[in-house]
Amino acid sequence: MTDIFEKSKRTHYSNEIGPELAGQTVKITGWVHEIRDLGGIVFVLIRDKNGITQLTAPSKKLSEEMMADVRAARKETIITLTGTVQESAKAPNGVEIIPSNIDVINVSKLPLPLDPTEKVDAEMDTRLDARFMDIRKHDVSAIFKIKNEILHTARNYFYDHDFTEINTPKLVASATEGGTELFPITYFEKEAFLGQSPQLYKQMMMATGLDSVFEIGQIFRAEEHDTLRHLNEALSMDAEMSFRSHDDMMDLLEDLIQNILANVQANCQSELEDLNHELDIPKEAFPKVTYDEVVDIVNSHDVEMEYGEDLNRAAEKVLGDTMGSYYFITEWPTAIKPFYVMPLCDNPEKSTAFDLMYRDLELSSGSQRIHSYDLLLEQFEKKDLNPDSFTKYLQAFQYGMPPHSGWGVGVDRLTMVITGAKNIRETVLFPRDRRRLTP
Ligand code: AMO
């Protein structure tokens, strides 16, 4: 079995073979994408992660054995092709390969659970059920290559800005966000939950003196509703900084998003082409609109929204149409934001909380946090929360907690915006929603 690796070792990926290699021998390995047998000539398209290469087999020029090997090709079987590069204007990348040897590496079962040749648009459920095969399509894998660029850029950005990466527990004892429900789990003889957010931990890290921390990790939300923008398991990118205000954190978030957009534009051209998507890169600073202005805008478009309510779907749509691409909503009412959000000192009914939106989609929430122990206790009372459930969190506020601020970005939603995906499920390898727990 060991020589199977020698046998399948490629000299090139598809995108590395062009007319400049004409006359040379190359070895490629990939999945059989399509077979066209025209009698006197057979074409086999071979797909690898970077593209498609055409094998051309004219029966007049090749031995009977070789023609038999070519004709034995089956869709989605993995083969290794050795052959000579020849220019061909009609073939992908302007080249075709005339075979000198074909090795079958592993045979695919037929019929296929779905067709990765991108010609048949399968239902989302069929695609997710056979996700491994769905991702063989280049316009699907492009989303994950771009998500990778987003995460790569973000990590580098954090390291360059002197952040420490943290990993906090996902098995937790209490809620942080309110609003969304928790998933209860059995934790030996205790009650426990899956974490909704690293919020309490990233704040406790501010009491350690590390100053700036970030985490990229899963959050779990027992959202009942089944929408194109909610999942029950999502990827959150969280940042928290000591001695920084909510305004500083909005600046940081804007700069990070601009860095991500610039890198995706520079490094993911072929993926954007596969997706037929043009990046929306704002040239101006992200506008800011206060919550009060939002209510006025929404009401002036004949959509009802009371002061003190969260944005409903209709309100988000009106706002998205009015504000355009990236913008911040600031000065949210303290009453509808979580207990840890710092109220504005000159008007405590309003808070330092902000949301980053892209059109009608919320991408991120953040705020300055309360660092005073006494003020936190007051907020617990106002929000009808029991401080006994937060003893260990509260302890961190009694021994020199710096003033601090932070935000959390929904990475899957950001990926939707950057890839143009309409359904959040497109941006997650194995999405978890109301109906789906496998694969
Ligand atoms: P929030 O609850 O607004 O804030 O979550 C932050 C961001 O995470 C994304 N998100 C989701 N994405 C997909 N499916 C979901 N069910 C889902 N829920 C949330 C959104 C959202 O803007 N602790 C605060 C952040 C902070 O203040 O630092 C928090 O969790 O894009």
Image (cartoon, rainbow, N blue to C red):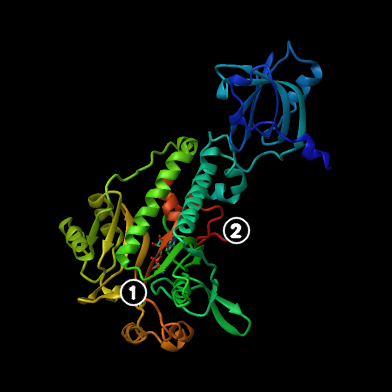
Q: Is residue 57 visible in this depiction of the protein?
A: yes
The quadrant the C terminus occupies is bottom right
The quadrant the N terminus occupies is top right
* Mark earlier in primary sequence (2, 1): 1
Please give the residue where the numbered disc 2 appears in the rendered image. Answer: 438
Residue 132 picture location, percent across and down: 62, 47
Amino acid at circle 1: Val
Q: Which mark is residue 341?
A: 1
Residue in the picture at 50% in, 56% down: 155
Q: CA distance from mark 2 to mark 1?
A: 37 Å
47 relative to 166 in the view: left or right = right
| Between 47 and 25, the one nearer to me in the picture | 25
Amino acid at circle 2: Thr
* Picture layout, residue 103 above or below residue 359: above
Residue in the picture at 31% in, 46% down: 282
Residue 35 picture location, percent across and down: 65, 26
